[in-house]
Image (spheres, rainbow, N blue to C red):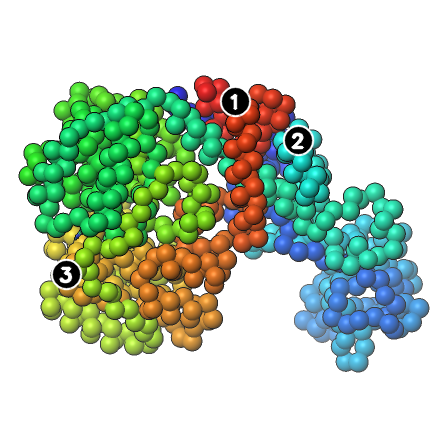
Amino acid sequence: MRGDCRYIVYMRPSILFPLFAPLTSLRGVGPKFLPLYKRLCGGEQVADLLWHLPSGVIDRGYCPQLRYADKDRVATLTLAIVEHNPPRKHGLPYRIVGVDETEQIVITYFNAKGEYLAQLYPTNAKVVVSGLLERYRGGWAMNHPDYVVPVERAAEIPRAEPVYPLTEGLSNKMLRKTVEQALACVPDLPEWLDPALKARERWPDWKTALMAAHHPQPESAALLPGMEDSSLPILPPDAARRRIAYDEVLADQLALSVIRKHHRASAGRALAADGGLRRKLEEALPFALTQGQQKAVAEIVSDMQEPKRMLRLLQGDVGAGKTVVALMAMLQAVEAGAQAALMVPTEILARQHHATLNRMLAPLGIEVGVLVGKSRAAGRAETLQKLADGALKIVVGTHALFQDGVAFQDLGLAIIDEQHRFGVHQRLALSGKGRGVDILVMTATPIPRTLTLTAYGDMDVSRLLEKPAGRKPVDTRVVDLKRLDEVIEAVGRKLQEGAQVYWVCPLVEESEMSDLAAATERARILGERFPGQVGLAHGRLAAEEKDKAMEAFSSGATRLLVATTVIEVGVDVPNASLMVIEHAERFGLAQLHQLRGRVGRGQVSSNCLLLAQMPLGGTAKARLKLMRETEDGFRIAEEDLRLRGPGELLGLRQSGLQQFRMADLSRDQDLLEIAHDDAALVLSRDPNLESERGKALRTLLYLFARDAAVPLLRAG
Ligand code: ADP
Ligand code: MG
């Protein structure tokens, strides 16, 4: 069984087709606006727009007489137009005076065409305007009303107007129009919810929920007389949003459960060995394994020796020493006669692990291969050959490992490092390269226990809680950016002591170019000050150049590496003992923690300088303070959760929890737990989702693009 996307797309139920139609099929979304919609809703299909929910609502139902009106509030007024006062000079505003039965109001436009306004506001006629009602110079005023219609067409003004999160170039009006079109395409879908749950939560049907979520009612609405006999169903507050959030979470939990069940049920194999190779490695290592590492190795080896398939998560903070644990697991596989593969997210990491593993395994006479992006690597054909005939037992690589041309003689163990960068598809594809492949996933994301379940499903978990002995704490300080000169002097002293230094340049949002400019410029300045010692690595460099820069730094040829966040993950240069992070206030806690984890890996004491633009905002201040106080990733995660809510939780974006569009883990954590139990119960009763509800649930999986799980059902 492979996770073949083309096949799956072909299988999508036709009832969902309208939702997966391109956004360009809607009126008003052409080549000009498509990029804006893509930026705004993260996709280019109708469903992506539907998942873009309003963040609030404007109540236009407030229709006061002016004498009794509240100021600074959106109001809808019926006015007779009394006079037009065009500007006497170009550049001055155009004013229109109107009255209701009680008082007058001045409506003001800046830069509007007179003829247009004359048409819009015929003198002596009655018009209805809606906009922000203000006081100005002792009278009523409204600037640029949002709506102006003749009184007979008053119904065109929405009673409640949803307000969407916007991006520059798209107005709320445009967005609403497009969303209304999208809503008009929404099909009725079969109900996949458990009837008891639906009743208990008083949730509406899916389509009703989606409609309601896009048409939020102002809080006052329920208080208005006449609501009771309206045809709108009266929903408990937030019910519509919670329902669709639940749908999303349920799709996710169901997919995870199916995948896990399939994995567990498919025949595994016992990778048995007496541990001779592992002992040899332990003897050759320059350090002793920590107790935590020993325990993790024991747990992994015990799984591997069982005839069932291993699915285990190795969780350990940056620098906790996961690599050597992975290596021990690989040796277990090799000694049992199988092959082992380690998949990492970037080429830099692949090459670095390749070098590290080869060095560690040299005394054992075991060769490690490397496989990265297509044609580039020399010796690729030879590596492929050796993997196919079994001459090569261990290979490290990027996602290139599971591409079509790669065949293993007998893959027994797949290890996935920093797995948050990989999707479920990729995990499946790698295990499809062998039969009964054991899987070990390694992550440095210190997700609190309660959330592990959601990110990874029910994997077995090993944790490395302690760092290797002899580590000195990283002395962390926050420094005003203005003191850059002093920082450069400090860098100079470090270099003179023989240490190496990382210098991380800030992330500039939405503009990789200026990121790059900042890093290049900083490298130039530092290069002048420390000639011949400075390297530069950033995401825009070609892979080879990036690798060259990283290799030059890790071999010690360059002493100071200026980088963007490309060094964030996994890189290991024990001689580096100073980390400078420019504009640290712009980084999230997750990144700061990961970046700082790059130093403090050797025997000497290390420093981290967080250069920040003062004065700091509240959250930035709290974040940097926390960084000073602790290096404990779990504590940082918990505090971050408290500071900002789980949506922003340390590393969640990468961990896969951020894959939710509608669910917000700070509000909906209870839904996760319900969905988890719901999914388990459904699958125990209807393992292949063949009942009526089961079929509806399949549709749900497709709806939320969790369809990697569907073929497993059919195979199941
Ligand atoms: P991570 O968990 O972040 O992947 P690594 O596996 O890269 O961490 O380990 C970080 C550093 O710690 C490496 O230089 C590694 O050689 C070293 N190391 C690992 N285990 C031990 C140990 N038991 N004692 C001393 N150093 C260790
Ligand atoms: Mg690592």
Disc 3, SS: loop
Picture quadrant where residue 440 is located: top left
In this rendering, would 48 be left or right of 118? left
Assess whether mark 3 and mark 1 are in contact (beta carbons under 8 angstroms). no
Residue drawn at x 29%, y 53% is: 465
Specify the quadrant that holds the N terminus. Answer: top left
| Nearer to the camera, 272 or 419 | 272
Disc 1, SS: loop
Q: Mark 2 — residue?
A: 191
| Nearer to the camera, 710 or 567 | 710
Viewer-side label of 1, 2: 1
The amino acid pointed to by label 1 is Asn
For marks 2 and 3, give the CA distance. 60 Å
Query: Taking 636 as reference, is 670 above or below it?
Result: above
In this rendering, would 161 be left or right of 389? right
Residue 584 on image: x %, y %: 36, 65
Q: Earlier in the sequence, mark 2 or mark 3?
A: 2
For marks 1 and 2, give the CA distance. 17 Å
Q: Mark 1 — residue?
A: 688
Q: Is residue 236 visible?
A: yes
Residue drawn at x 18%, y 66% is: 605
Residue drawn at x 23%, y 67% is: 607
Viewer-side label of 1, 3: 1
Query: Taking 468 as reference, is 107 above or below it?
Result: below
Query: Taking 114 as reference, is 23 above or below it?
Result: above
Q: Mark 3 — residue?
A: 603
The amino acid pointed to by label 2 is Glu
Within 8 Å of ligand 1, the CB of disc 3? no
The amino acid pointed to by label 3 is Gln
Residue 431 on image: x %, y %: 33, 28
Residue neighbourhood size for the residue with mark 3, other residues' Cα within 10 Å, grouped as few (<14), some (14–19), many (≥20): few
Residue 576 on image: x %, y %: 18, 60
